[in-house]
Image (cartoon, grey):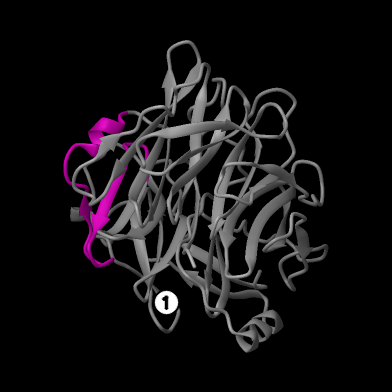
Amino acid sequence: MAGRYAARADSHRLAGQQGPLPGAGRAGRDRPRRGGHHHLAHGPVRQHAAACAAAQQRTGIEATTSFAGYAGQPALPGAPRLEVNAIASAQGQRLAAGSADGYPAIWRQDTGGTWTLVTSPGDLPTRPGPATLTGVTYGPAGWLAVGVPGPVILTSANGTTWRPAAGNIAENLGKISTVSAAAGPHGYVILGKLAIQGGGCAADVWWSADLTSWTRAHDVNGTEGSSQTLAVAALADGFVSAGSHNGRPAAWVTSDGTTWRTIDLPGPADAQLNQIAVIGTRVVATGGSDGQGDGTAAFAVSSPDGGATWQQADLALPAPGTVVTALAAGQRGWIAAGQYGTPGQPRVVVWKLASGKNTWAQARVSGITGSGTGTTPEITALAVSRDGVTGIGPVAPATSRQAAVFTLPAP
């Protein structure tokens, strides 16, 4: 069976910034966030029924974990102390990507559950200000991590030694405001979103077979109007990406990473897709408002055939203003996390979608969802493994490098 891959991408708001997210004010704006960030999870899952039952018995906030920063490096002004935006599992390793004190960072989880920083200051490109990694993925030539602003493009053969990507890929991507990546049997894809003159957006998409040479895709912007590609996932026979075209949800499919076909999707106006995840040929994507108009509620779409045809999925929302913050695919279905409520009293919602179904169900998770749970950190990254589903959310990203680790019900 084909592997399962998931990705998400959002714009990056630094602590202390006011107003729209970077890249806002154009025909497509990145979805509003309540702090925290994005997700990418990737890898096969073999979930045993007994492990699933055990995971369901211990769901909730499992621990508060410290994520190390760079010793001797001062925190960059205006940057959060911690962001954990993506998790990926492959080759017997689980990596998390984000930032520590404003510096791009990658951590590896050991067998005891501790997250150890594996990047070093010498691995990072020189930057004048804060940056964060928004995605990490593994493919046939090794690991790839991407982030903004910059962009920041890092590669690794083993997951522990990282360096800036070979060639001019970071320079070629230019001044993109969002970036995401995916890897699969057909290589690697990096998506970027560029502002264009006149207030619109353009997609900047690159493909590589080996992480050393990159080819710019064509046909992504072949249709008229503004396009933004915000998330991408690998299929057995290519890639599928999601975002928006002219203020409405859209998807793109390719068999080779360089020639893409645009598909306008069902869904509300002034909306975009931010997350995408794949099981075999079935694709699920979630999204919400692009910041234009009166705002769009969170929604979901699905495709049974690798992105060729799409339909809306029923995503039960607990309240107006709900946003989806993370999405992942497991062996038997999908799991998503979201947030709703007021800035002073945010609440978390968790959904599950069974494979072959098109209606999401809210999952009750002790200590996380529902009334009376107090202030729960936003789940900014999800990972599915044979041991269950893990969610991570920084506790107080403006002031500490502590994150809550959640155990969630398997999809």
Mark 1 Cα within 10 Å, few/some/many (few <14, many 20+)?
A: few
Picture layout, residue 247 above or below residue 101: above
Identify the residue at horizontal 43%, vertical 34% (top origin).
260
346 or 195, which is in the foreground? 195
The amino acid type, in three-letter code, at marker 1 is Thr
> What stretch of residues is rendered in magenta?
147-174
Write down the quadrant of residue 54 in the picture: bottom right
270 or 43, which is in the foreground? 43
SS for callout 1:
loop
Identify the residue at horizontal 46%, vertical 49% (top origin).
80
Instruction: Determine which residue is flagged by label 1.
Output: 114
Picture layout, residue 388 above or below residue 214: below
Instruction: Please give left or right for residue 258 compared with residue 35 in the image.
Output: left
Is 18 magenta? The answer is: no
Instruction: Please give left or right for residue 289 compared with residue 159 in the image.
Output: right
Q: Position of residue 390 (x, y in %)?
A: 56, 70
